[in-house]
Image (spheres, rainbow, N blue to C red):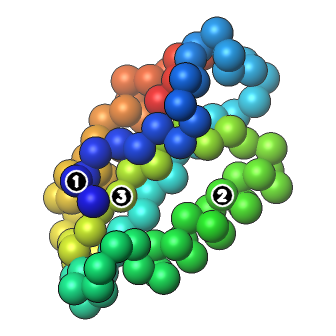
């Protein structure tokens, strides 16, 4: 993973978003201990599936996925976590994440 925001729905634009539906960004983190595996680990796949199912059950639209690989949970200075927090402060209203 290159620590960049994944747009889960290509072509999502402010015009296509329903303003009455809450939008969500997902954050996934791969433990340092799991970082030596090739590709997405079962942990990342499980995290993503569970979060997507939860959002769907709530009626929320997932517009972005952030993922940090190989960072300990004790370190809050993770690149995509920081990007997500910044986006949450700057993307208010009807604009997509």
3D distance between C-alphas at marks 1 and 2: 21 Å
Residue 15 visible in the picture: yes
Which label sits in the foreground, 1 or 2?
Answer: 1
In this figure, which residue is indicated by the disc labeled 3? 67
Q: Which mark is residue 52?
A: 2
In primary-sequence order, the first of circles 2 and 3 is 2
Q: Is residue 94 above or below residue 21?
A: above
Q: Find numbered disc 2 in the image and state the secondary structure of the residue it sits on.
A: helix
The quarter of the picture where the N terminus appears is bottom left
In this figure, which residue is indicated by the disc labeled 1? 2
Residue 81 versus residue 65: which sits nearer the camera? 65
Residue 74 visible in the picture: no
Residue at x 46%, y 38% (from the top left corner): 7
CB of mark 1 within 8 Å of CB of mark 2? no
Residue at x 51%, y 52% (from the top left corner): 26
Q: Find numbered disc 3 in the image and state the secondary structure of the residue it sits on.
A: strand
């Amino acid at each position: 993973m290159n620590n960049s925001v994944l747009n889960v729905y290509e072509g999502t634009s402010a015009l296509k978003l329903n303003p009455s539906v809450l939008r969500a960004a997902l954050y996934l983190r791969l433990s340092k201990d799991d970082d030596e595996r090739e590709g997405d680990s079962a942990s990342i796949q499980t995290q993503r599936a569970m979060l997507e199912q939860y959002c769907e059950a709530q009626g929320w639209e997932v517009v972005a996925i952030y993922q940090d690989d190989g960072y300990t949970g004790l370190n809050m200075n993770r690149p995509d976590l920081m990007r997500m927090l910044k986006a949450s402060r700057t993307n208010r209203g009807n604009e997509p994440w």
